[in-house]
Image (spheres, rainbow, N blue to C red):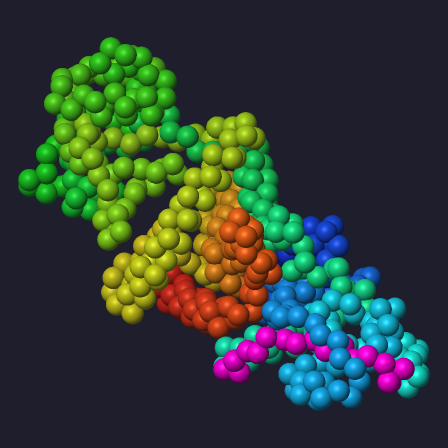
Amino acid sequence: MIALLMILGVLLVALGIALSIALHEVGHLLPAKLFGVRVTQYMIGFGPTLFSRRRGETQYGVKAIPLGGYVAMIGMYPPPDETGTVNHPAGSQDSEATEGAAATASGAETAGAADSGPRDPYLSEVGAQYGAPAAAAENRGENTRENAAETTTTKTVRSQSTGLFQQMSADAREVAAEDLQPGDEQRMFYKLPTWKRIIIMLGGPAMNALIALALTAGIVSLHGTAQPNTTVNEVFECVVSADEADAAEAAQSECGPDDPAGPAYEAGLRPGDEILAFDGQPVEEWDELTGLIREAAGESSSVTYVRAGEERSTTLTPILTERPISDGLGRAQRDDDGALITEPVGFIGMGADQEMVQQPVWEAGPVVWEQSKAVAGVVANLPVRLYDVAVSTFTSAERDPDGPLSVVGVGRIAGELSAQEEIPLESRFASLLSLVAGVNVALMVFNLIPLLPLDGGHVAGALYESLRRRLAKLLGRPDPGPFDISKLLPLTYVVAVMMLAMGVLLIYADIVNPIRLFD
């Protein structure tokens, strides 16, 4: 039965992630079609195609490696910079001199292209690969023979280096040109205004944000969230400094000869007691109680509580000790070296019981925001976090439970969570949905990194293009034209290789040294 529950949990989360990836790509697809860009492919996964079907002008399909997806749009790369167009009589010496550096066509061919071929310079640049209908081609041939003696138009393209990086850019253009068709002149991505391109590229992360908000809203409003109450859940016999152990471990460490006794334990408080007042001030929430305790270090304070229906009182003195600072998600904060961030506060050594409390749907916003900040913190220190993962994987060091993990790690956590029979089924299901919501938050934040091939890289390119055009206009300079992101392909390949290496490391770590939420 446990094995079946683990399998069901893994399958549920896997399905949720697959749907999240598919909807991420829908977030790109819908605005692209809305703005008139021709989308040639909508694919889930990478590698060989397992299934595909064409609907209209777009091929929809599923590929063999389910580690992502993509939407292919025409005109992702702008044409090369052009320096001008010169007309020469047919057969002139100037026309011959430009052979190899200029593209020539008869005036009749140009007229024929106006009816059935590409007018755009990008389409003209790849005219050799442009497949015109047979009838149009025949008409152009007849017109060419009739008007061969007329003028010849020469388009001069700025000379470029033939180095490795430039060749990579040219190769990318060739591949992109294979999908061009008649009528694509005004349907290419690079011709859109900057704001439209940004909307298309942010559509994917925005979809992930909506999924995370929707799932979280359902969880907090229907199932509720665990909130501490004023009922005592555990009482510690001694106080272990947070400097000596992790926050969770500090509560479970054995008492040493130099550890001070726990004030709550010495005062007679025990699990099950319900705290009514502290130092004469009534308390209804645990956070309210802990705030009073933290401010009362070294001061003798009265505690009123209920045990077995009988109201009692006692006196204790909170100890001034270093305790961890928690973030918005209730997790202990750490510095760049991984050490706990602490502050000196009053502490009596007891923990609270928890109960599920349903929240308004709008409380999903702050939850997702806190999760986003936590993921952004991991991404900002990603090299250090990956180094820590590598150290914990290949040495005996303990792995950080708040560090990055792969889809394999997410699956393992889902399986372990589903197998916890002591947890109510409803709570396990809600936790699995919360796990999928967390994955969507991670997808959103990670895709906003301003590096190609991520969505944030395309947004950064569009913003850079807009900025340099505005500066040129302010300075009275010629329009520099669209920014050619194909020139960044070498960097793109480097980032892709690094992402692949990161994935391999995290998958291996999640196999040999996984993050475990349950002992």
Task: Verify whether residue 68 appears in magenta.
Answer: no
On the image, which quarter does residue 38 sit in? bottom right
Q: Position of residue 153 (x, y in %)?
A: 76, 77
Q: Is residue 257 above or below residue 348?
A: below
Q: Is residue 181 above or below residue 296?
A: below
Task: Verify whether residue 153 appears in magenta.
Answer: yes
Q: Position of residue 260 (x, y in %)?
A: 10, 34
For the image, the number of numbered tags is: 0
Task: Residue at 86% x, 85% y: name it.
Answer: 149
Task: Residue at 19% x, 27% y: name it.
Answer: 346
Task: Give the camera-side residue of 120 and 194.
Answer: 120
* Outermost residue toward the top in this view: 280
Left or right of 346, for residue 417: right
Left or right of 147, for residue 403: left
Task: Residue at 22% x, 39% y: name it.
Answer: 342
Q: Position of residue 508 (x, y in %)?
A: 40, 69
> Can residue 347 be seen here?
yes
Task: Give the camera-side residue of 361 and 196.
Answer: 196
Write down the region rendered in magenta: 147-163
> Can residue 199 be seen here?
no
Task: Give the camera-side residue of 70 and 364.
Answer: 70
Q: Position of residue 117 (x, y in %)?
A: 82, 71
Left or right of 137, for residue 333: left
Task: Residue at 56% x, 30% y: name it.
Answer: 361
